[in-house]
């Protein structure tokens, strides 16, 4: 048997529900962080990245992240670069991510939605190779 609620009880129930939801989400977000499920990561395009002797033009690389992570690249060099999925040997997926030319100081963000080892490179400087490992 359902008991009919008066307006006051109904308001109280609605308010309590909203309060519970409002408290639950921050707690879940904190729990995810505590489990190391960080949902964002940073990669720097280092100064002198286009020099063929640069050992890690994209730093860090390889970068390991969880599925669903937003990765942001920042061009810390003093010349333009790209972050383009694939590699210079022509192994570039048709719908891969591509920053286009990033001027110095610019950023580019891509969300990695599926697991795998994802290669990327700079279309202007084919010696610049990077990798994101998504788990
Ligand atoms: Cu470049």
Image: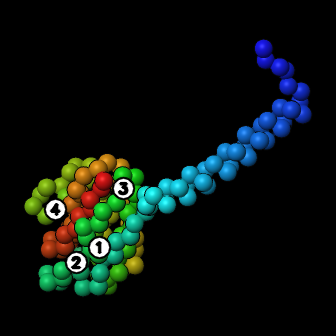
Residue drawn at x 34%, y 71% is 43
Between disc 4 and disc 1, whose residue precedes?
1
Q: Name which quarter of the figure residue 125 lies in.
A: bottom left
Residue 87's disc is: 4
| Residue 47 x, y percent position in the rendering | 29, 85
Nearer to me, 57 or 23: 23
Mark 3 C-beta closer than 8 Å to ligand 1: no
Between disc 2 and disc 4, whose residue precedes?
2
Q: CA distance from mark 4 to mark 1?
A: 17 Å
Nearer to me, 97 or 24: 24
* Disc nearest the viewer among 4 and 1: 1
- The residue at which mark 2 appears reads as 56
Between disc 1 and disc 3, whose residue precedes?
1
Q: CA distance from mark 3 to mark 2?
A: 22 Å
Q: Is residue 10 left or right of residue 124?
A: right
- The residue at which mark 1 appears reads as 60
Q: Name which quarter of the figure residue 26 lies in.
A: bottom right
> For numbered disc 3, what is the local secondary structure?
loop
| Residue 74 x, y percent position in the rendering | 37, 74
Q: Residues within 10 Å of mark 1 (few under 14, many from 20)?
A: some
Q: Label 4 near label 2: C-beta < 8 Å?
A: no
- The quadrant where ligand 1 appears is bottom left
How does the figure colour the protein chain or chains? rainbow
Residue drawn at x 24%, y 52% is 116
Q: Residues within 10 Å of mark 4 (few under 14, many from 20)?
A: many
Residue drawn at x 63%, y 48% is 24
> For numbered disc 1, what is the local secondary structure?
loop
Nearer to me, 81 or 49: 49
Q: Label 2 near label 1: C-beta < 8 Å?
A: yes
Residue furthest to the left in view is 89
| Residue 34 x, y percent position in the rendering | 49, 60
């Amino acid at each position: 048997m359902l008991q009919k609620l008066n307006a006051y009880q109904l308001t109280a129930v609605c308010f309590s529900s909203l309060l519970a939801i409002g408290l639950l989400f921050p707690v879940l977000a904190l729990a995810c962080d505590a489990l190391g499920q960080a949902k964002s990561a940073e990669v720097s395009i280092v100064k002198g990245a286009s020099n063929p002797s640069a050992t890690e033009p994209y730093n860090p690389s390889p970068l390991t992240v969880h599925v669903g992570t937003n990765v942001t690249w920042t061009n810390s060099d003093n010349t333009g670069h790209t972050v383009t999925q694939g590699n210079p040997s022509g192994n570039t997926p048709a719908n891969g991510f591509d920053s286009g030319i990033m001027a110095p100081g610019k950023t580019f963000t891509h969300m990695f939605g599926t697991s795998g080892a994802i290669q990327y490179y700079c279309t202007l400087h084919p010696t610049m190779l990077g990798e994101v490992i998504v788990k």
